[in-house]
Structure formats: C-alpha cells, structure tokens
Image (tube, rainbow, N blue to C red):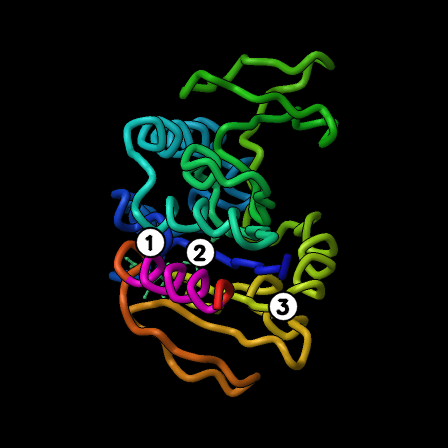
Amino acid sequence: MRKIVVFTGAGMSAESGIKTFRDSDGLWENHPVEEVATPQAWVRNPKLVLDFYNARRKQMHEVEPNKGHYALVDLEKYFDVEIVTQNVDNLHERAGSSRVLHLHGELSKVRSTRNPNLIYTTENWEIKLGDLAEDGAQLRPHIVWFGEQVPQFETAIKITQTADIMIVVGTSLVVYPAASLIEYVPFNAPVMLIDPKAEPQSRRKIEIIRGTAAEKLPELVKKLISNENT
Ligand code: APR
C-alpha cells in the first residue's frame, strides 16, 4: 500500500463548529493567546487558563466530526494513512482514523505540572485548581503552549519522510516548527493543500485546492482511490 501522510490544522475542524485561530481579530475565543496559552499565563493566572481549556474541552464534547474527517477514514481502506495534526481536539479519532499524532497536545489528556510523563486521559470536561496528579502536583492541560518545546516534532518528521503523497488541510502554515514539516516530504512525492485561503508556497511545489475540508477532502479522497484502482 502506498503511504499518505495528512497534515491538518484548525481549518480541518472549522465545519464541525470549532473556531480557527487566525481568521478574524487575532483573538482566540475572545482572549489574546498570551493570556491563556503560554507558560507565563499559567504562572500568572492558572484559573483563567484552566477555565479557558475547560471551555474548549466542553465544546469538543458537543461537536461532531465532519465529512472531511470521515473521508480520511475511507482513505485507510486503500492507503497506509498517518495523520499529523496541530489540532488538540479528538475529532480524527472519533471519526475512526487509526493513526493520529498530535503535535500540539490533546484536550482529552491532562498531566502533572511536575512530571511531564504523568499523563492521564480524562472523560471529564473540567479540571479545577486542587485537582492533583499522583505525585501531588496540580494537573494542567496536556497542551503545547506558545514558547514550549514540541516533543513530537521529531516523530512527525520521521512520518513525513515516509510519504508517497502528502495532503495538507486547513492550516495557515505560520506556526513553527509545525509549518516546516512540508520541507521533509520526499522530493518526488506530490503535496496537495486544501484551504479556502491557500496561497502558493515558495518552499516547494504544491497543488493548491481552494475550498473547505468538508467539501474538498471527500472529492480528493474519491479521486485518489479511483486512481489507485486503475
Ligand atoms: N476548511 C479548510 N480550511 C479552513 C476552513 C475550512 N472549513 N476554514 C478555515 N480554514 C483555513 C484558514 O484559511 C486558515 O488558513 O484554516 C487555516 C487556519 O489557520 P490557523 O487558525 O492559523 O490554524 P493553524 O494553522 O492550525 O494554527 C497552528 O497555532 O494557535 C496555534 O497551536 C495552535 O495548532 C495551532 C497552531
């Protein structure tokens, strides 16, 4: 089976009802990112940070995967598919995709503030001040905040280097190191980018597909499957 690596960003979940980051006013759900998504914010006002991610987690439980998420599940019947996502929601998994790497963490997980390896899956949408890990330290969201290392980046590079085809969906490609991932796609592997605002990239040749994930991904998947079967 040929290998397809799919790299997704916030636009992937937009039609499920989760807002993207950079579409409007530079605010994320009415907050400047420095106020809610940095290690400094956590030191300054942990309750605000917890409340912010509690709201994101609650919303995640209320929304559903869209047609784009499901199209990627269909692709697995014909291709070896791996998804690398910048999204912290679990919509790829809930649609049924089997291999998903989260570069920026996961809303459905929390971890100890003292030991980054003490990670727990939570069914609950709410974490409060005073909710502790086994080591007695406060729990925090298992999220890569701005200014923090991206521990899964090396793994993401290795996955990308195995691609026969790369599909990029719904990302503004401005946040590093994630945005540099496309530079690791093998030279002869085609790269396609689905995004309503996609701009030509100078870094490498990319087939631009202007449109939304729920509209264009099912079309692309159908085309790839039919080419593979002829
Ligand atoms: N389908 C596809 N793409 C869409 C859709 C849609 N329905 N709606 C919007 N988009 C596109 C926008 O045109 C934009 O290019 O999705 C992109 C979203 O870009 P960002 O909001 O910048 O999201 P992303 O690239 O995922 O951000 C990267 O930055 O805030 C941090 O850690 C956070 O993982 C995030 C990272």
Q: Residues within 10 Å of mark 2 (few under 14, many from 20)?
A: many
Residue 209 found in image quarter: bottom left
What's the distance in space between the residues labelled 3 and 2, CA to CA?
Answer: 20 Å
Q: Is residue 80 left or right of residue 65?
A: right
The amino acid type of the residue labelled 2 equals Gly
Q: Quick check: marks 1 and 2 in contact, CB under 8 Å?
A: yes
Q: Position of residue 23 (x, y in %)?
A: 28, 62
> Is the residue at mark 1 in contact range of ligand 1, meaning its CB lies under 8 Å from it?
yes
Foreground disc of the pair 1, 3: 3
The residue that disc 2 covers is 9
Distance between the alpha carbons at the discs numbered 1 and 3? 29 Å
* Amino acid type, mark 3: Asp
Residue 96's x, y, as percent?
46, 36
Residue at image coords 66%, 28%: 113
From mark 1 to mark 2, how far is it between C-alphas?
9 Å
Q: Main secondary structure of the magenta part?
A: helix
Crowding at dot 3, Cα within 10 Å, few <14 / some 14-19 / many 20+, comes out as many
Query: Badge 1 local density, few (<14 within 10 Å), some, or many (20+)?
Result: some
Q: Which residues are magenta?
A: 216-227
Which numbered circle lies on residue 20? 1
Q: Is residue 12 above or below residue 176?
A: above
| Residue nearer the viewer, 90 or 47 | 90
Magenta residue check for 212 = no
Residue kind at label 1, given as amino acid type: Thr
Foreground pick, 188 / 52: 188
Q: Secondary structure at mark 2?
A: loop
Residue at the image point whose x is 55% and y is 76% from the top = 190
Residue nearer the viewer, 93 or 128: 93
Front residue of 213/128: it is 213
Any mark on residue 164, and which? 3
